[in-house]
Amino acid sequence: MKNLFHITALSLSLFAGVAHADADHTGLAELTVSDSRSDRPLSGFFWYPTAQTGTAETVHTNAVWEGIDVIKDAAPEAGKHPFVVLSHGMYGNAMNQTWLADALVGEGYIVAAISHPGTSTWLRDEDHARALWDRPRDISRVIDHALSDPALSAHIDPDRIYMAGHSLGGFTAVALAGGRFDPAAFDAFCASDAADIGCKALANWKVARSDDDRIQMAQDLSDPRIKAFAVYDLGGTQTFSAQSLAAIERPMLVMGAPVDIAGMNLDTESRALSALLPAEEVTYLEPATLSHFDFMGICKPAGFEILQTEEPGDEIICRDGGAARAQDHAMILKATVAQFQ
C-alpha cells in the first residue's frame, strides 16, 4: 500500500459536528499533556461517561468514517472510573479507535488517546520516529497527566488503569508490560529468511542504528501502574527478548487477525508473542473473520470507493468495513472488557 493509514487524514475539511437532540452520555474533551517534554508535545482526546443531558453532536467523522455522538466538555459522571489509554498503529492517530473509546465509555470507563509524534498521520518528524522508545513513554505521560489533573484525577481509579494498542500500538503495549528490546536478536531476525514487515518499518525509520539509540531502545520502558493489556494484531514481536517476554507478570489479551490483507505474519507476531508470554498471563484469540483493519472504525458505504479513487491501494482498509466489521467490534469489545475486569 502506498500510504498505509494515511486515509485517516482524508478530506479533513469534511470533519464537522452534526447536532442531535438526544444525548448519548459520552463526554468528549480535548487532551493536551503539559509536562517538561516540550520537545515532544502530546495531544488527543478524553472520552468519559457523563450524566449530563443536552444536545449531542457527531464527531470524528468524514466521507469515509462513521463517527460517534458526544456531548463536548460535559461534566464527568460522579465517582471513580477505570481508565484505559489507547495507542494507535503506524501513521494512525488519536481518532483511529474512537469506536472503541465510545464503547468502553458505555461500560463505565474513562478513555484517553493521543497521536504519537513521528509515527502518526500528521506528525512524521524523522527524529521522533527514530526515537521509538518514546512511544511507551507517551502513554506513561498521559497517565501522569490524568492522575495529576485536578479535574480529571477525581474521577479515575488509580488501581484500575489499563492499556490497549493496535499494530505498532501493540508493540507499545508490550514494552509497557515489560518487553525489552534486544538489538542483536532483532538484527539476526531481520537478516534471516523470516524477516517480516516490522524489519522494513524500523529500517525506514532508522531505529536502533547508533550505539546510543540501541541503548535507549533496550532500556526498561514498563509502567507498573498499568494492570492489564490488550494487544491487537501487533507488529514488532521480534524486537523483544524472549527472556523479557517470559518474565511479564501482568494479564495480556493478544488478538491475531488471520484475514491477511496487511502483510502481517501471525507466526512471527501475535502467535509468537502468545507462545513466549507466561501461559497464566496470556489470553490468545484469533477469530476467523478478523482482519488487521477491523480494529479501526466503521467505514461508510462509499468509503471503499472513495479510497480507491483518492488513495489507490488504501481501499483495503475499508474492505468488509461496514456491518461485518461492526460484528467484529462487538467481539473485540467483549474480549477487551473481560480482560480489564
Image (cartoon, grey):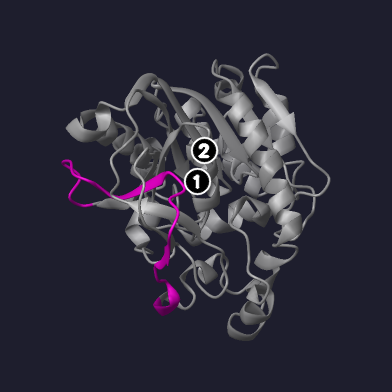
- The N terminus, quarter of image: bottom right
Report which quarter residue 161 is drawn in.
top left
Q: Give x and y (percent) for residue 213.
A: 37, 44
- Identify the residue shown where x is 58% and y is 84%: 310
The label number, if any, that marks residue 106 in the structure image: 2
165 with respect to 303 (left or right): left
- Tell me the SS state at disc 1: helix
Q: Amino acid at mark 2?
A: Gly
Residue nearest the observer in this picture, 242 or 22: 22
- Tell me the SS state at disc 2: helix
Return the residue found at the far bottom.
309
* Magenta stretch, residue numbers: 13-39
52 with respect to 93 (left or right): left
Mark 1 highlights which residue?
A: 102
Report which quarter residue 341 is drawn in.
top right
- Identify the residue shown where x is 35% and y is 23%: 80
The label number, if any, that marks residue 118 in the structure image: none
Residue nearest the observer in this picture, 99 or 196: 99
